[in-house]
Image: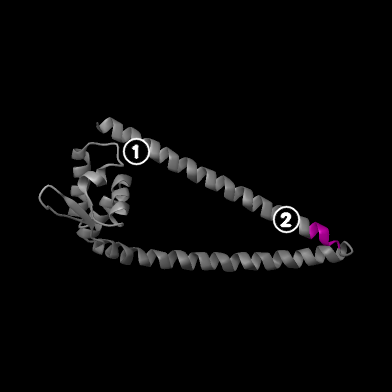
Amino acid sequence: MSRNLDATFAALADPTRRAMLARLAEGEVSVTDLAAPFDMSLAAVSKHLKVLERAGLIIRGREAQWRPCRLDARPLQEVATYLERYRRFWEDSFDRLDDYLKTLQQQDGRQDETHERTKDGDHERSHERTKDRSKHRRSNERRDDRRSNERRDDRRSNERRSHERKK
């Protein structure tokens, strides 16, 4: 990895800096306006901005009393290029998994057909099993969503506590 890529990843590692970049993606903004949503001092915001600036992710200007910041997304292109290799890896992995699941479903379908023939064409059981599987899958998805939301809320609480300790 190049030094620039290391600096970019280091800058992106902090949720506050990612939030600042998201705001700057909307357009140029002053340091004061950029600091407004964060519960931290201007000095702390300035430190975050220095990290982003060293990584080449922002450009800070000076126009009289106004100190505008704007996003420079060029370093993110290097990140995207780096991550592209891994995207292909995951896509290939998911494609193989999809093929495997289709094979399992086909085998399961054949078993269902055999079962249905032995039970005088009782299609209701097959339909009930399918509904049960769908219900189980939706239940798992809801559980995963809840866990994801809980982790996000925990991260936000930790960030707030961390910012409060820094004061």
Q: For the magenta stretch, what is the residue range? A: 122-126
Examine the structure image and report whether residue 123 is included in the region drawn in magenta.
yes
Residue 47, x across and y down, in percent: 19, 43
Q: Circle 2 sits in a helix, a strand or a loop, which is it? A: helix
Residue 28, x across and y down, in percent: 24, 56
Q: Which residue appears at 20% of the width and 53% of the height?
A: 69
Residue 36 visible in the current orientation: yes
What's the residue type where badge 1 is placed?
Answer: Glu
Q: Circle 1 sits in a helix, a strand or a loop, which is it? A: helix
Residue labelled with disc 1 = 159
Residue 1 visible in the current orientation: no
Q: Quadrant of residue 123?
A: bottom right
Q: Which residue appears at 53% of the width and 47% of the height?
A: 145
- Residue 166, placed above or below residue 98: above
Which quadrant is the N terminus positioned in? bottom left
What's the residue type where badge 2 is placed?
Answer: Lys
Distance from disc 1 to disc 2, alpha carbons, whole Å, reads 42 Å
Report the label total.
2
Nearer to us in this view, 156 or 30: 30
Which quadrant is the C terminus positioned in? top left
Residue labelled with disc 2 = 131
Nearer to us in this view, 58 or 140: 58
Characterize the local packing of mark 1: few (<14), some (14-19) or many (20 or more) Cα atoms within 10 angstroms.
Answer: some
Q: Which residue appears at 21% of the width and 59% of the height?
A: 4
Q: Which residue appears at 28% of the width and 61% of the height?
A: 76
* 30 horizontally vs 26: left or right: left
Examine the structure image and report whether residue 109 is included in the region drawn in magenta.
no
Q: Chief secondary structure of the magenta span?
A: helix
Quick one: label 1 or label 2, which is nearer the N terminus?
Answer: 2
Residue 155, x across and y down, in percent: 40, 40
- Residue 139, placed above or below residue 96: above
- Residue 144, placed above or below residue 96: above
